[in-house]
Amino acid sequence: MSKIHYIKCSHCQTENDNSLSYCSKCGTPLGVFTGDRASGRKIALYILLVLLVFAIIFSYFYSQTSNSVKQSAGLSYDEKEQYENRLNELEARLKSARKKLSVFNNNNDNVSAVTPAVSVDDLKANENVVTGWVMISDPWGRQIRKFRAGMTRNGWLALPSRACLGGNKWIFSSDSGGEYSISGGLWIGGDKVGLWQVTGMNNIPEVSELGSWNTQSPVTWMSLESDKEIDVISIPAGSSRGFFVITSVPDDINETGIFLQNGNIVGWTFGEWLDKGYMWPGSTGSDLEYNNWVMYFYDLTFAHGREEKFAMAMSLPNKGDVLELLSVLVSGFSLQPRLAVEDTPDYLLPEAIIKKMRVLVTRAVRSGSGGNVVELFTDRVLKDIADIYLLIDIVRIMANELGYEAAINEIEDSGRYISRQTGEEVPALDKLHLQYYQSWLHGLVTESAIDEGWQVFNAAKSWYADDPSIHLLGVELALLEGDWQEAERLLYMMDYPSAYQDRVQLLALRISEMKGEAGKIVVNFNPGSSRITVDAVVNGWVTQNFLVDTGASIVTITSSTAEAMGLQVGAPRHTLSTVGGTVKAAAVTIDSIEIDGWVEYDIRAFVVDIPNRPGLGLLGLNYLSRFRMDLKTDQGTLLLTPR
């Protein structure tokens, strides 16, 4: 038969069977039976240890109180009041310690639940604070921020507005388990901190209530990021901002945490988000009503702005569609920013977006979509974005797709605008600008486009008057035009770097040759060819193409040329032998023939259409004999020097 044990009620001293949980007489909860006398000795030992701990605590509080009293002598009224507040706080803590010891003595049969040393985590638990993480998500389901928070009995927690920007879904994840939505709270535009409520966690028993801060009493601060805790802090009054009082805090309070006073949460600190203390001067949590909602906070601070458009682009499901992503990002720059720079997440800052856009532009060009990129980045878009290096990327693509003129115009318009706006001079842009002018002008010289070449030359000189390459291209234009005097003037009006000396000497030689040809008719033809043709103006206005023929005794013109000049052509009475056979021809007199600016008058000619040579006349000896001829077949020139 097992031995029956009895448990004595700590309230009425009635002995009860150990199978009972409550006293059969008064209903007081009974302690747990701990065994025989050996167990009783263990209980006594534990009691002695607890009493020893209590004695040490009591001695510490007594010494602190004694020192405070001693130091209060001779102090001012305000200083004495601060010491009295500290004494009150110490007394309250002493009473709390006595109460805990009393509870222990009344339940000494449950000694196994008592721990001799108290950890920081236990201390936080004793303060009855619900801690956890606040997680902020954007409309596209991405968690954009996560930070620590402490909650009051009615589900209220203070959150820094900066940390909540860009999110329309706020979740509180308790350290003890469970995730709860944050729906609404107290916040107005411009507030750095709002008081928001967790849905479904109201009126939690034994959790600290939101209390109104008493500026005359000290507070305890407890970190929500580490084990750090600071007791008996006197906080200055501060100034009211929105729903809170903002006040300075000691330098060693630099983490997210809460202020406790008389068991209530009366304030918050926010670590890296804000450097002040935010104290609550208002009503308790049970008396508060919302004035705002999370969805409205999102609309007021983030929606319909540049940052939201960027965030949406970053969430596009099809990241492979480069042009679509670029288009959304470009449209974002047309919108005004909603956030201050210091409040904007790093990944939504313009410089981060521009960096991504440059990568996307490169990908688009490699895939053969350079033309689409140029259409997307108009001058208005480039000015809105205002980034010189993105502009350089676009201008390079533009030069390939649309030509040098379009690229140069973009540099001179958008490029100079951005430079003025940013105050930034970029040598790379100037170098590209000059390079495009050089390439454009060189192409025009190669194509002998003289009129357009002079227009581009003058525009380039307005930007780069001292550039030797541009200047020498102007010399070449003058030579193309046959104006050796202008070419010589341009060539010798500036000094050239040594790298240009060979080119300068070649141009000087060409000018010298042209000077030697002054007063001469210069007929150019393909070097090595035996067929030399030249265009001449007959009678001052009709152009005739002639074949230089030293075997022909008389000049010939076509019937269409004679008709155009209105000549009276008689009957063909002369027989001529040509490469196409024997033909009949009529004789006429031509008033003038002009070649290369030289005019000869009164020239006898035959009107004949040479077989198989439509439109071709012959420049015979009766014209050529008026000149001294110098034929250079290898160079492809025929010089006619008037006699």
Image (spheres, rainbow, N blue to C red):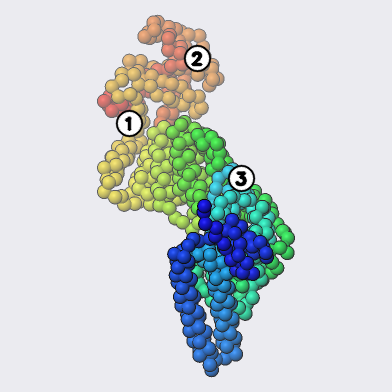
| Pick the front one: 388 or 338 | 338
- Give the label, 2 or 3, closer to the camera: 3
- Circle 1 sits on which residue? 641
Distance (Cα) linking label 1 and label 3: 88 Å
Which residue corresponds to the image point at 41% horizontal and 20% vertical from the top-left?
546
Question: Residue 204: x percent and y percent?
Answer: 65, 59
Which residue corresponds to the image point at 59% horizontal and 47% vertical from the top-left?
138
Q: Are marks 1 and 3 in contact (CB under 8 Å)?
A: no
**SS under mark 3:** loop
Give the residue furthest to the top.
582
The answer to whether 566 is drawn above or below residue 581 in the figure is below
**Mark sitting earlier along the chain (2/1):** 2
- Give the label, 1 or 3, closer to the camera: 3
Tag 2: amino acid: Ser
**Mark sitting earlier along the chain (1/3):** 3
The answer to whether 393 is drawn above or below residue 203 in the figure is above
Which residue corresponds to the image point at 48% horizontal and 39% vertical from the top-left?
360
Give the residue furthest to the bottom.
74
Residue 618 in view in this figure: yes
For residue 559, the mark is 2
- Which quadrant of the view contains residue 526? top left
Q: Mark 1: give few (<14), some (14-19) or many (20+) Cα within 10 Å.
A: some
For residue 139, the mark is 3
